[in-house]
Image (spheres, rainbow, N blue to C red):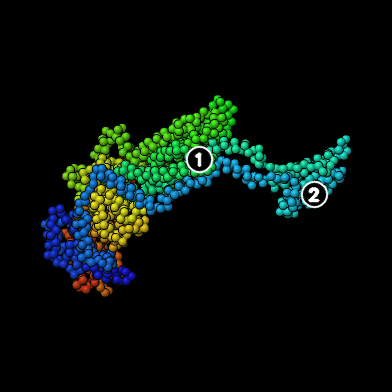
Amino acid sequence: MSRGRLQANGTPDFLKQQTEFEYRLLMDKQEQCSTDRITQFIQEYVGNVVLERESAAELVYGIKRDESKQIERLINALDENKQTIGINSYGLSMTTIEDVFLRLVQEEDENDQTQENTKRQLDDQVFRKQYERVYGFHLFWTRVWALLIKRWHVSRRQISLFLGFFLLSIIAEILFISAVPTPKEIQTSLSNNPRVTDAQVTLIPSIYNAQTIVAYANSNGNDVQTRLLNYLTSTGATIDNISDDNVLNYVRDRYYESADVFVNKYQLSFAAYYNATSVSPSLRMNAYFSTVNFHTMPTSLGVAATNLYQFYANSTSKSIVTTNQPIITNPKSGSYLAEIIAVLYCFEVFPISLFSFLNSVMATIFIAILLLTLITERISHSKDLQLLTNLTKRIYWFSNWIFDFSLCLILISLLTIIVKIGGVANPKSDAEVHVYQNSSAAGYFFLMYFMYTLASLPFIYVFSFIPNSSIMGFTNFFIINVIMCVIDAVANSVPVFIKNDTPSAGPTGVYSVVTVIRSIFAVLLPTVNLKQALSNIQLHENTGCISIYNSLIGTKLSTTDSLMSSNRPGVGAQFIIFFVQIIFWWVILIVIENRLRIRQRCQGCCCCCENDSLDSALTDEWDDSLLDEDVRQERQTILQDNETKTSSVIVVEDLVKQFKKRKSKSNEKQNYLAVNHLNFHVQKRACFGLLANGAGKTTTFRVLVNDIKSTSGKIIINGKNINEMKRDLEIGFCPQFDWLIHDLTVSETLTLFARLKGVEASEIPEMCSNMIDIFGLGTYENRQIQKLSGGNKRKVSAALAFMANPALVFLDEPTTGLDAAAKRKLWKVIRAARDVGLTIIMTSHSMEECEALCTKIGIMKMGQFMCLGNLQHLRHRFGNGYAVKVKVAGDNVDNVKAELVSDLPGIEIQDQHNEVLFCNVPFSYSSSDEGNPTKVPYNLARVFEILNRRKEQNLIESYSVTQTTLEQIFVQLAGEDEETLSDRREKNQQTIPLTTTRL
């Protein structure tokens, strides 16, 4: 289907007849061959043939459908004249259903002229063009400017974070100044709080009405009972006068009747015992109370006390009234409360003093917002993709620092202005911000925030290497800093609760311990240091607090010292800590980014000679005799032929990558060879296909693009050893996964990488426009990367890889996620780049893709090549014959089978579906002429001759002949016995020799 319409339908054979070519002839050409001569030679036998494409090592011709009968003559001629016309081998492939799809499903404006123009554009305007480059200081500032523009685009598109950085901080500071209560407001609030002033309670039984009070008096206490009942009745309560002296049993029985009634009805009970027999009469009262409501215990005690008082005073007018009243409501306690709040304020006890703490929390938030972009670039590998443009890590971090510091500088300037205005305009004389009406204090406020920014930026750069999620990184950073600030605030308030009996003798040991702990916190985290600095500024401007410190703690704080004094309440110590933190965190960042180089230098200093001799010994002693002969020959060529090293774009020599893998049942580590003495070279105008399945392919690619370091071996790109020379390597890389910056548009992404690669500014628009046209991204030019489909993201990644025509391009599964039409268009781009002179190394799970693009293929298993060479060479060496598909005419299946077996000895009929036979014709068959068994090679022309004859006899309706596919070779070689290879690995810890099964 195309554009909502059915274009064609039918059987596969019928659909294949809709294409122009029935067969494609693939030729492995020699270095000095003439393409025109080969074409003329082919046309002598097959007149209607078209040269579809040409590469440095391969020619592909399309044989039209009406010429298939002439293939027999052509094959005979090729077998006789291969060396004469300059080819090593040849092969045939059939038209596929994908070819049918691509022919029928075309874009409306696509025609032959358009394709020809596109091809010419690829060659002339893009891949052949030499772009002007900038160098030196100009290149440095071009890259810095490019990264600054990138950060600006990312920030403005993350509008919530960008506004949060400024608006949240500004609004928070305004609220801190205007809404945070002052100490006097807190005192007034406590004194006038209705819950305090109205908390006065007169403890009389009526406060629990409606209720029932149980009363008992012994027989001798009738007067006592009467007085008790009269008093309780006057409270308005219902009285249960009982005759049993066990009050608890009476109440418990009511509980069993109804728990709800018991809880709400019975609050108080009393028992009076009058003793008139003694010399002096006495009265004993038992008071019982419920634990459900408040104040029942003192209320019951008050009732009992009143009755005792009335008894001994012999007067019912006497009574005792008990009132529960908070001490804070006492007018005389106001001054005492003010003193307490003043002390708590000076020691920053929550919530009396909050300004420095809230500012530290706010500072944590706006610094943590800057952390998000850094984490995202690291975990998405967009940072790695930028560094592959020869961008140095120093420039990367320098540009980030400029952008982040500029934002922070603007913000802290605004905060300082707000604080200064708040200090002057705030009418509350005891407000914490009031200290900043002094210009000197406001200046130090700015200075401390300035130093905090300088110290925090390298700190978050180091912290960005830890989390695996930007949200978790932000959350963890925020929580850690806030908790440490809370601990610091609590530690600062501890000494006020520790009594110092001799303040004149100096502070207690607790104060000294707290000071050390707070100093450690300040050294560890810039946020804590900022909080302490702001606290000291407030303390320095408040002489009352200094007096409280000296009188309670025994310190000798001075009101005359400068704010830059290193002694408290100066901020000199905090300034020094900030300065040390700046140096420390930048050094840590440098160490992290250069950890591999530092490790290599340390190893080199310790055992330089030993390592050199060890590498040499490993190379010399490594036994390559069990490798495939092509792989072994490649290694010997690289080791012995200096001309090959000079002429090749990339040379990989005895590459080894070893990992230490922990055993599952022990803590010991064993060496695991992911890449085992790999050797290959790729010439200019070539495409090398690296095929493997979990056998070291990804590790090899990571080593080649310098993402990880090799254990030993050499990688030479354009004559430069990347282990020794990391800069100025002209390479492009299309990663397997999405390494793009999602907040940039397609155009912005291309412009960014053009600038990073040092392309002259005047040529960047034309280059970006060409890349957009070539890769079919015109519709999405101004669309953000995150809104693209997976296939279009792959196109952008591929465009970045080919940008500025690097000498070497790495493509890691470049067509993953692309539909058939888009895949073929990208193939055309890759072929055009290759034919112009670019060298390409690619991996792919699509064997068809490697057949179409690669001039040289290596199949890996367990870190080593199983085979190496161009496609036709691999087919010739490892193929298991010709795949023949025959569609029988009528009901002659059995007859056709018999005749094929007779005409083609050794043929194997592998499968049958109705009238269609699937056969395999081996490259040779056994012949026992004259009693001597010999291998007789099959002539492909003979196969065509027999099938054509049977078709003319109307025994078969149609047929096809193809060679072994790359996929079959891959499955055959990559599926070799694992146990054999494992046994070899156990015998030799240093090497994993491999063998290849020969067919």
Tell me the crowding category of disc 2: few under 14, some 14 to 19, or many 20 or more residues within 10 angstroms, Cα based: few
Looking at the picture, how far across and down is residue 19, in whole percent? 24, 68
In the picture, the quarter occupied by the N terminus is bottom left
> Image quarter for residue 959?
bottom left
Q: Secondary structure at mark 1?
A: helix
Judge by depth and name the residue closer to the eye, 698 or 675: 698
Q: Mark 2 — residue?
A: 234
Q: Residue at x 29, y 46 (%)?
A: 143
Which residue type does callout 2 highlight? Ser
Q: Residue at x 42, y 40 (%)?
A: 446
Q: Is residue 601 left or right of residue 340?
A: left
Whether residue 823 is visible to the viewer of this picture, yes or no, is no
Whether residue 822 is visible to the viewer of this picture, yes or no, is yes
Which residue type does callout 1 highlight? His
Q: Mark 2 and mark 1: span between their CA atoms?
A: 59 Å
Q: Is residue 297 left or right of residue 921?
A: right
Q: Secondary structure at mark 2?
A: helix
Position of 243 relative to 47 (above/below): above
Q: Residue at x 83, y 39 (%)?
A: 313
Q: Mark 1 — residue?
A: 434
In the picture, the quarter occupied by the C terminus is bottom left
